[in-house]
Amino acid sequence: MDQTGTVDNLLTEERVFRPLPQMVRQANLSPQKCEAARKLAADDPLSFWEEAAEELYWFKRWDQVLDDSNPPHYRWFPGAQCNIVYNALDRHIETAAKNRLALIWEGEPGDSRKYTYYELYRAVNRLASALRGLGLSKGEKVVLYLPNLPETVIAMLASAKIGAPHCLVFAGFSAKALRERIRSTGASTVITADGFYRNGRVIALKNVVDEALSGEDSPWVRRVIVVHRANVQANMVEGRDFWYEDLVRHERPQAQTEAMDANDPLFILHTSGATGKPKGVVHSHGGYMVGVNRTFSWVFDIKATDIFWCTADLGWVTGHTGAVYGPLMAGTTTLIYEGHPLYPQADRFWNIVSKYGVTILYTSPTVIRMLKRFGSQYPRRHDLATLRLLGSVGEPISPETWMWFHKHIGRSECPVLDTWWQTETGMFMISPLPVSLLKPGSVGKALPGVEVDVVDREGNPTPAGKGGYLVVTKPWPGMMSALHNDREGYFQDYWKLIPGCYFAGDVARRDEDGYLWIQGRADDVLNIAGHRLGTAELESALVSHPAVAEAAVIGVADPIKGEVAKGFAVLNQTAAPSPALAEELRQHIRRELGPVASVREVVFRDRLPRTRSGKLLRRVLRAEETGQDISQDLGDISALEE
Ligand code: PRX
């Protein structure tokens, strides 16, 4: 890292898309309302967030909107009592939402289940009663080792309802990863399934839990609840293990919703660990529900008639905010899918969109590139006319990927809302709104009530066009309340580098219009002949070549330039690797970005190393280059998605 901490900019993307008149006419947040909201938020952010809080139900009102007496340990809505589940379910039972669809689930084999708000409410109450019957009480942690099933949503809500923080562990993680997470959260209860379907196979789960709980130094768990999903033989331990269906069958469909202090924990979620060890991020009921409710319903312009599909696994924050709490608080219908995007073939997603009439599709660049690789004939086979908004999250989306998504999935009509946020931020932070002017590849501007900046190492704002560290300069309600059992890490990792600011770990630049462009993770910045370059622009240039489906770029040591770039490309189905193509790709990047972007070589790969949540693991590629063994450090995230 150099002294200044700024990053050069090579990309010039000049395409812009104006919102269509019907979009502006129908938007809940008109351009005028949007301006007014920005103004109120800038002049008086606490009143802005207080107004947002008043849209929700509280058992007891707050003494203060924000207690900032001990930064960076901010407390939102101290003195208030609430429960996010009251807002996501209970209150809808009193309104016309009662009989509306809350949840649509599709299993990989094609089976499907639907729940109205009333049905979901009753299912959650049954499980909440059962958990209480087993002696689970407020404050005890529940680990959910579950794939995308209705019971996963029910278990999240039932735990939160009785005040037991949930900790989802992605169902693809190993016994070792699961054991570490159970141990570090001190959970007394695990909810899992016998197995599930993924890419045409049955993946057994309960036996992974058994392995995680066996042997010396195994964590102490009193209850294991098993959802019957895939007819896998499960070894049930007497007195500890219970079938979910047996537990809930005779339970009452009423259960009291626990009144929680606004700052009581709602969930613990471990970060995906693309650049470091996983950390246990804690979110609390009050601030999280206010931040998510406001930003989710504004960005996705939620209407009662929507069918909202967030394709993420429930085990990531995108699943928590984007598939469960966001849509249910907004009273819309959320759709979740159990399986693989390519099963049984590359049109599964488009089949789901047309079958259920999905209106909003929220997914990630990794998924879009994966589907794009198979070409536009797959989406063309289906009627995608119900779609009105598209969303992207998780990584920088290259302008070409954005264009494909917009054209082939969005009929060149649906805005692509590229939302920037993190496990730690809980809620959307930077995103266009449906009425915004869009620039492919840009995340737009910070949402009203969110203050961000791009700064150098000293914390000084960088000029337009020059990249630097992305920081959040004011507290926001969805912010994590702590790192689990790691007060020092919370300060060191996020608040120390730029005093007074939240350090997101990303590099970004702001253009002349104030639009933000994420350039990659700060840890991945390249330094070529004194130019510091973000990875996103180089990778975007590489994937803008028609032969390339996916790309990664890393810096490798060079005696003269200090560092040079090396590219890795996964080719489209129709292209074949050759030395001539590698050379053409090098030249292509140079043509796109100029001579600074000289890439020493481009090599072809069948796939790229990614975390389970789809993030590029550039440090694996760097370690391969230098022959360094990082398997120890990678731990459970080295198990890659197939
Ligand atoms: O690097 C940014 C990238 O994902 C990181 C956060 O990862 P995680 O906590 O797993 O949460 C992912 C989903 C909220 C960020 O630091 N990231 C997220 N969204 C975007 C993004 N990079 C570019 N554009 C985005 N829209």
Image (spheres, helix red, strand yellow):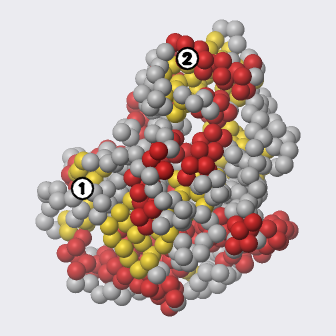
- List the residue tagged with mark 2: 582
Residue 228 location (% of width, % of height): 22, 65
- List the residue tagged with mark 1: 195
Residue 564 location (% of width, % of height): 65, 17
Residue 257 location (% of width, % of height): 44, 83
Q: Distance between the residues labelled 2 and 1?
A: 43 Å
Q: Which residue corresponds to the image point at 31% horizontal and 81% vertical from the top-left?
A: 126
**Above or below, comparing residue 421 to residue 493 in the picture:** below
Task: Kindly indicate the quadrant of the structure image that contains residue 483.
Answer: bottom right
Residue 573 visible in the current orientation: yes
Residue 272 or 458: which is nearer the viewer?
272
Residue 466 or 32: which is nearer the viewer?
32
Task: Kindly indicate the quadrant of the structure image that contains residue 540.
Answer: top right
Q: In this view, does 62 lie to the left or right of 627?
A: right
Which amino acid, by three-letter code, is at mark 1? Gly
Q: Which residue corresponds to the image point at 43% horizontal and 35% vertical from the top-left?
A: 634
Residue 2 location (% of width, % of height): 74, 26
**Above or below, comparing residue 549 to residue 484 in the picture:** above
